[in-house]
Image (spheres, grey):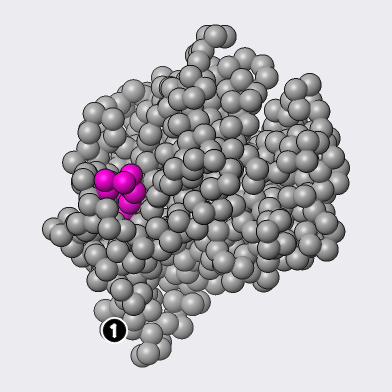
């Protein structure tokens, strides 16, 4: 405790934030705070392909101004090294610009932020550090959705984009997401989140910036007082107009649709509603209690549309106003959840992410394979065949939809850092409510453009007395009923995840729902189609599939389950649904048993 207290007092002496400095001084004086201090000083917060994400608070293992300053210095150094054409082995130097060789160009960067606690401060200090390093920097004018930042990377021809957000994490968290673009990367990677080796190279630069005699000292990181540019309203208007123009009023003119929308106390409300209205959808009812940004997220226990109960207020409003559909963006609006009324029980239900992924795929097929009515993806010819893609943990149904339409389909590792890189991509998704429907505009998941296309599809169906559920039935009849679910095991100690993965590698399940496992793939070994990743895949004789992987952003082990039930005719749909749910329950039981968690 004495050593921890000394470290805390030293860090507090350098901390530029009076609030976290005072908190550290109080902890250092509290004999009962040993565990909290030990966790806060357990090491430097690790930077990876997802950037940084952690609880806010003092110390090197939390999100705070010291950690963010170091991250900004690391990214700046990496951008300058890329501009100078230095090899990866040479990209470790002090926190300032490298003296040799001179950069071949002046990098440009754009910084955005959401409405969480400290997001604006973290963004402004990032802009100040970039500017001082000689990077031409743009700072977005207000808390805005992540898709707007991703759009800005390309629209402003930037080499990098920084988004300060923790997306759908709890209120105490914040994060730091990095995109590369412009002259720094190849054409297909422009505007996409980072992958290796950029993550390790940035992490090395951050370590260099953190290696100071004084613990927590950032005085050597230069910060400009001004000199960055705040874009005018034309940037946001450009995004909104471009997304609204995705709606095809000629082929799908219907706009009679009553929509309930919630932004989960995040930053998506105004932008999403402006887009929907510009596209002709005017019968919109926002959940007022959740419409304005609030970093405390007071009406939801967890601001994630996937969480049970998170959409209850939206469903209640939908019932009250007689809505046709519910659209829910997560707090940074890069994801969207869809709610529908089930005519069987008269209740509102959230569609699974895989169901929405399949619906959007079917709708894009009906539109000729892509959302954009103008030129196809940059670098592709006018007759380029649309390419569909989804992550390995998402449903196999999209591949069948693509095959039936004559389109190529690609499986990728989890995350839009992989999906968005697929050459010729016209549409990509993953089951965690992320959809990329217009890669030329936003090479990342975008919950606003996806919501618009869902509304367009639902409105067209309404004119012929059909719903999204009817289309799901059509897809089941054509390709088999694909049903999926997920089991997430949250742990306190990351070692628990390593132990469970090791156990599954050593003793994989022999059967899933009574069907023998015929194929076991250790994804950590890699393949010609997929880079190596920490994951395990099981396929049984009847086509049941399970993929197990650690979460990239939370202390969780995730199991992704999918069963496929053939459907011989409309009269068998109900029975197939029951069979699929029973099969999923059995597979859940089998996987928990394999993990030693029967009672979890």
Residue 124 is situated, as x and y percent measured from the top left of the image, at: 59, 49
Q: Residue furthest bottom?
A: 31
Q: Is residue 262 above or below residue 92?
A: below
Q: Is residue 508 visible?
A: yes
Q: Residue furthest left?
A: 506
Residue 513 is situated, as x and y percent measured from the top left of the image, at: 31, 58
Residue placed most toward the observer, 284 or 568: 568
Residue shown at the point (59%, 63%) measured from the top left: 303
Residue shown at the point (80%, 53%) measured from the top left: 323
Residue 174 is situated, as x and y percent measured from the top left of the image, at: 51, 59
Quadrant that contains the N terminus: bottom left
Residue placed most toward the observer, 418 or 213: 418
Q: How many marks?
A: 1
Q: Is residue 56 magenta?
A: no
Is 350 left or right of 131, judged from the image as shown? Answer: right
Residue shown at the point (33%, 83%) measured from the top left: 34
Image quadrant assignment for residue 301: bottom right
Quadrant that contains the C terminus: bottom left
Local packing at callout 1 (Cα closer than 10 Å; few below 14, some 14-19, many 20+) is some
Residue shown at the point (85%, 59%) measured from the top left: 321
Label 1 secondary element: loop
Q: Is residue 544 magenta?
A: yes
**Chief secondary structure of the magenta portion:** strand
Residue 122 is situated, as x and y percent measured from the top left of the image, at: 55, 54
Is 221 left or right of 249, judged from the image as shown? Answer: left
What's drawn in magenta, residue-wise? 538-550
Q: Is residue 125 visible?
A: no
Q: Which residue position holds label 1?
A: 1
Q: Is residue 280 above or below residue 285?
A: above
Q: Is residue 202 above or below residue 546?
A: above
């Amino acid at each position: 405790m004495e050593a921890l207290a000394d470290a805390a007092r030293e860090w507090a002496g350098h901390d530029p934030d009076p609030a976290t400095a005072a908190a550290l001084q109080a902890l250092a004086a509290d004999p009962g705070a040993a565990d909290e201090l030990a966790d806060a000083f357990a090491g430097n917060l690790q930077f990876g392909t997802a950037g940084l994400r952690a609880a806010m608070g003092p110390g090197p293992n939390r999100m705070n101004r010291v950690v963010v300053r170091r991250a900004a210095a690391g990214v700046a150094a990496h951008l300058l090294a890329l501009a100078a054409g230095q090899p990866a082995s040479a990209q470790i130097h002090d926190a300032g610009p490298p003296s040799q060789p001179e950069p071949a160009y002046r990098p440009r960067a754009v910084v955005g932020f959401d409405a969480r606690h400290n997001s604006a401060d973290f963004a402004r200090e990032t802009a100040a550090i970039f500017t001082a390093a000689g990077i031409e920097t743009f700072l977005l004018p207000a808390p805005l959705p992540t898709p707007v930042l991703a759009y800005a990377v390309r629209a402003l021809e930037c080499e990098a984009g920084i988004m300060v957000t923790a997306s759908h994490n709890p209120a105490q968290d914040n994060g730091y997401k990095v995109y590369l673009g412009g002259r720094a990367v190849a054409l297909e990677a422009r505007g996409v989140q980072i992958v290796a080796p950029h993550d390790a190279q940035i992490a090395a630069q951050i370590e260099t910036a953190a290696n100071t005699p004084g613990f927590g000292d950032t005085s050597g990181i230069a910060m400009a007082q001004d000199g960055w540019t705040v874009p005018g309203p034309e940037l946001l208007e450009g995004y909104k107009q471009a997304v609204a123009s995705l709606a095809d009023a000629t082929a799908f003119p219907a706009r009679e649709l009553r929509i309930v929308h919630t932004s989960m106390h995040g930053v998506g409300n105004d932008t999403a509603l402006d887009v929907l209205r510009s596209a002709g959808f005017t019968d919109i009812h926002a959940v007022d209690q959740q419409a304005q940004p609030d970093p405390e997220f007071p009406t939801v226990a967890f601001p994630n549309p996937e969480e049970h109960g998170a959409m209850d207020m939206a469903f209640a409003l939908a019932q009250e106003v007689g809505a046709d559909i519910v659209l829910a963006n997560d707090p940074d609006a890069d994801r969207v959840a869809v709610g529908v009324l089930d005519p069987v029980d008269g209740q509102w239900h959230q569609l699974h992410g895989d169901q929405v992924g399949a619906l959007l795929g079917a709708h894009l097929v009906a539109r000729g394979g892509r959302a954009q009515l103008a030129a196809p993806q940059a670098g592709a010819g006018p007759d380029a065949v649309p390419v569909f893609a989804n992550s390995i943990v998402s449903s196999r149904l999209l591949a069948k939809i693509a095959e039936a339409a004559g389109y190529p389909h690609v499986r990728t590792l989890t995350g839009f850092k992989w999906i968005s890189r697929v050459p010729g991509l016209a549409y990509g998704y993953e089951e965690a409510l992320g959809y990329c429907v217009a890669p030329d505009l936003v090479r990342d998941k975008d919950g606003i453009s996806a919501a618009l296309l869902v509304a367009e599809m639902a409105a067209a169906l309404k004119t012929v007395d059909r719903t999204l559920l009817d289309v799901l039935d059509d897809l089941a009849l054509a390709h088999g009923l694909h049903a999926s679910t997920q089991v997430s095991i949250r742990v306190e100690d990351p070692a628990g995840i390593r132990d469970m993965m090791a156990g599954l590698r050593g003793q994989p399940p022999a059967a899933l729902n009574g069907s023998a496992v015929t194929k076991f793939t250790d994804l950590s070994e890699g393949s010609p189609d997929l880079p190596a990743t920490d994951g395990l895949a099981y396929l049984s004789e009847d086509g049941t599939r399970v993929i197990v992987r650690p979460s990239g952003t939370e202390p969780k082990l995730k199991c992704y389950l999918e069963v496929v039930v053939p459907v011989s005719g409309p009269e068998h749909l109900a029975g197939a649904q029951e069979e699929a749910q029973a099969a999923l329950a059995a597979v859940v039981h089998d996987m928990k048993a394999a993990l030693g968690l029967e009672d979890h």
